[in-house]
Image (cartoon, rainbow, N blue to C red):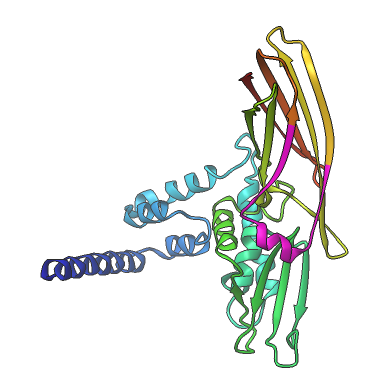
Amino acid sequence: MKNYINGLLLLFCFFVLISCASSRLMKDLDPESREFISKVRYIITKKERQVFLNLPKSERQAFIEEFWVSRDPDPDTEENEYKEEYFKRMEEANRLFSEGSPGWLQDRGRFYILLGPPWERYTYPRGKTFYGKPEEIWLYGWFVIRFVDHNWNGDYKFVADSTWQVSELNKAQMRMKPLGSDEHYPFEFEVNVKNLQEKGVSIHVKVPFRLIWFDDKNGQLQTTLALKLEIFDSYEEKVWDYQKEYPISLTEEELKEIIIKDYSINIEVKLPRGKYAYSVELKNLADNNRSFRKGNFKI
């Protein structure tokens, strides 16, 4: 027990020293470097931050230039679209959320910078109910973010609805703008083939609900998955062709209940013994995003 307590004390002292060292390094920065590290707080990685703080002053400018170059989506052009968009959103956040601290430092400003302007924004300055607090609801497609002004002072705080939501937002911090752009979640799915007792196979297609993009129509989340399945024999001749559309309609609450589950499609195919190859195309008609899978199986 004594060794265990001593170990905890050493671990605690280690983190205190690391924290103190980081604070000391921040104080030693020149004004330009301190401004840089402050303004990129939402997108700089822990490793990058630590490297920058330990650099001599003569090398910091080169680091700053490389920091932005590494994020430039098109290095062949003079403009750095990522950098320009980042600072543009920062200015917009300061203009939109001007109460209290600078807008870009508030929770609403942070999400505005990382995700871009919400597709829809609902404000309730007197609360949603008689006893409610000022509240805002932002929508990025069906992705919902909620802020509440607990102290009635204009400082709206982010309220997490689930651990999954927090996880997705943390990912957005490094990508900047995935939820508010046309670059929706990667449309991935799995295909599993199982032999049946009778001649043939069962082809099982699974796509996670969290990767399906929905349209919001009168409070109902809707989309249609269009599936195309082709099967070829060992001579590469098509022996089976299947096409069908699968409509999906859910409420927001229903989606929250099943967000970690999969949407499943099961197709049984009667075939004689032999070797085969399959090709599956799955298209989401809500955003025209599509993916393909190919594989082989034997009966």
Q: Residue at x 43, y 50 (%)?
A: 61
Query: 124 or 214: nearer the eye?
Result: 214
Above or below 154: residue 147: above
Say which quarter of the image contains residue 92. Answer: bottom right
Left or right of residue 118: residue 78: left
- Residue 207, compared with residue 130, is above or below; it is above
Task: Answer above or below: position of 153 versus 42.
Answer: below
Residue lying farthest to the front in this orientation: 198
- Is residue 266 rendered magenta in the image? yes
Q: Quadrant of residue 296?
A: top right
Residue 265 visible in the snapshot: yes
* Residues drawn in magenta: 246-267
Residue 56 drawn in magenta: no
Residue 148, given in percent of the width and then of the height, sits at 64, 80
Q: Is residue 138 above or below residue 98?
A: above
Could you tell me which quadrant the N terminus lies in? bottom left
Q: Nearer the viewer, residue 293 or 263?
A: 263
